[in-house]
Amino acid sequence: MREQATKRGSEEQTNKAAAEALRPEAIRKDFPALGQTVHGRPLVYLDNAATTQRPLAVIEAIRGFYLRDNANVHRGSYDLSHRATEAYEAARARTARFLNAAEPAEIIFTRNATEAINLAAFSWSERFLGPGDAILLTEMEHHSNLVPWQMAARRAGARLLFVPVTGPEGLLDMDRVQALLRPPVKLFAFTHVSNALGTINPAAELCRLARQRGIVTLVDAAQSAGHMPLDVRELGCDFLALSGHKLCGPTGIGALYAKRELLEAMPPWQTGGEMIDQVTLDQSSWAPPPHKFEAGTPNIAGAVGLGAAVDYLERIGRERVFRHELELTAYALDRLKEVKGLRLFGPKTAPPHAGAISFCFETIHAHDVVTFVDRLGVALRGGHHCAQPLMRKLGVPATARASFYLYNTRQEADALVEALQETRRFFGA
Amino acid sequence: MLDDLNDLYQQVILDHSRNPRHFGKLPEATHSAQGRNPLCGDELTLYLKINDGRVEAVSFEGSGCAISRASASLLTETLQGRPVEEVRGLFEEMHKLVTHGRSEKPLPEKLAVFAGVHKFPSRVKCAILPWHTALAALDNRKEPITTE
């Protein structure tokens, strides 16, 4: 059953509503969690690169599923199970359309982007990676796009190569990409947007270079999928991983996009119920994709929530979300320069700087900054951002990070700057 | 809420974090251990010179937040010259202080500045890391210890 997904991405851009600038003040009404105070101050939530808040549409979709449609999927022949299956598979179709995949079967539901990458790293490597081969990564990967490949390389007797991150702006060294994309490299996995630097990598260009040389690509879209228009066929990637909770969806649901011919060729990852065709005591055969890769009862309500989240973002328009984030980031980058002693990481301009801004004071540890501004209502993240090799390269033990989303306002960027000024005064930096 | 911040970051803590005492290697150390707080990247190495059941010299090096640096610095001042057998008891009282805001048995006065930590659950690990590391050093544990 191959449903042709409509090319929603380009419709979104030509949509008349997309021309209008996004109004975060109006959007905030969709997110009840944003209306609260912490420590007596209005919450300024700037940890969206870790997880976003959820709109009512998503919360209600999950609630509605449990209230009305809950049953196990795929095997029941009664009405309720049929409805649950329809809801689950409709979520797959919506996610496929969101990414402009050729068909819903190219979407495997996982727990998150990490599990999606683990699936690809295990299963693709099992079939296609051998001794002497290499996997190309970059120095700016999140641990979730590094450690699974370390394990896969170890199993196959293959090795890892890395595209260096250059300069204070934290960009990929494109000359080195050209030089490295050749045998024995079999697969190139890279992040679309760095969670630690905010860098937007030229994903389509990277995929094109790899494809020219017959190298398979995996795009870690955890930080991009909910923030900008994304079209896997325009990108030309073979795999793409995303997390639902980083794009308005619930935790515990993510997706791996993979081209059908790869899914056909790859062995299953986890095995058991739901993913089989025939089972005897001695051996089994597999269901076709996507079910071959979804063993056991899946996160049905999570998938329904993810479907509602991508619908929500499509309604708003990802082009508008992207433009809003770039404008807000440019504004914040500019204002953060006012803070004495603050060192900013990543590109100087937006774009290529996406909405995650990493910084540190020369003399105040990131953890102290985060604790201090929390008491002023500002939620930041401090630490190595699951990118320890990159932190070593930057020569800092940790940074603080502010990350924006569609509901953040200029006033919140101002509140961040004011909180950092107060931090500086307090610690006497 | 700024009162809480003033409780946490008392002047003594800020002073010790900026100018840590006994900072650096201790060539004559008989015991040492590494401590890490993977959550925030605190890393420290603690050196002890034990002689005749006493801490004859102590030092630390590494990087970390204000709380962990100040805690390590004040630990070195506290342990200097103290019988080894008292260290575990001090650790236990320090643990009570940073998790509940007070110790059961009296602690050396200068450690009282850490009472404010208990209002910041995410910072308890920072304050206690040097003390964990001290115990590991006395046990001569080779693997770095972590707060996770």
Image (tube, coloured by chain):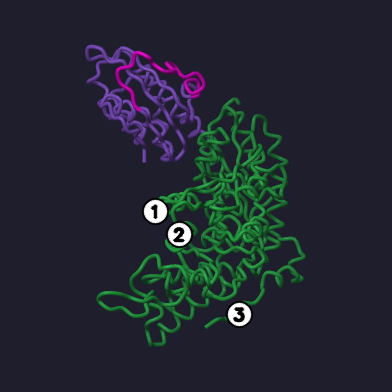
Chain colours: A green, B purple
B124 or A220: which is nearer to us? Answer: A220
Looking at the figure, which quarter contains the C terminus of chain A? Answer: top right
Under tag 2, what secondary structure? Answer: helix
Tell me where residue B124 appears, x and y as whole percent. Answer: 39, 36
Q: Amino acid at mark 3?
A: Gln
Q: Which residue is painted at 54% across and 57% down in the image?
A: A187
Q: Chain of mark 1?
A: A
Q: Amino acid at mark 2?
A: Ser
Q: Is residue B48 above or below residue A365?
A: above
The magenta segment is B14-33
Under tag 1, what secondary structure? Answer: helix
Upstream in sequence: badge 2 or badge 3: 3
* Crowding near the residue tagged with mark 1, few <14, some 14–19, many ≥20 C-alpha atoms within 10 Å: some
Q: Chain of mark 2?
A: A
User: Disc 2, disc 1: CB below 8 Å?
Assistant: yes
Tell me where residue A89 appears, x and y as whole percent. Answer: 49, 77
The label nearer to you, 1 versus 3, is: 1
Q: Is residue A221 above or below residue A69?
A: above
Instruction: Mark 2 vs mark 3: tell me if same chain.
Output: yes
* Crowding near the residue tagged with mark 3, few <14, some 14–19, many ≥20 C-alpha atoms within 10 Å: some
Q: Which residue is painted at 38% across and 87% down in the image?
A: A77
The residue at which mark 2 appears reads as: A125
Task: Report if residue A283 lies within the magenta region.
Answer: no
The residue at which mark 3 appears reads as: A4
Tell me where residue A373 appears, x and y as whole percent. Answer: 56, 39
Q: Which residue is painted at 58% across and 55% down in the image?
A: A223
Q: CA distance from mark 2 to mark 3?
A: 29 Å
Instruction: Mark 1 vs mark 3: tell me if same chain.
Output: yes
The label nearer to you, 2 versus 3, is: 2
The residue at which mark 1 appears reads as: A155
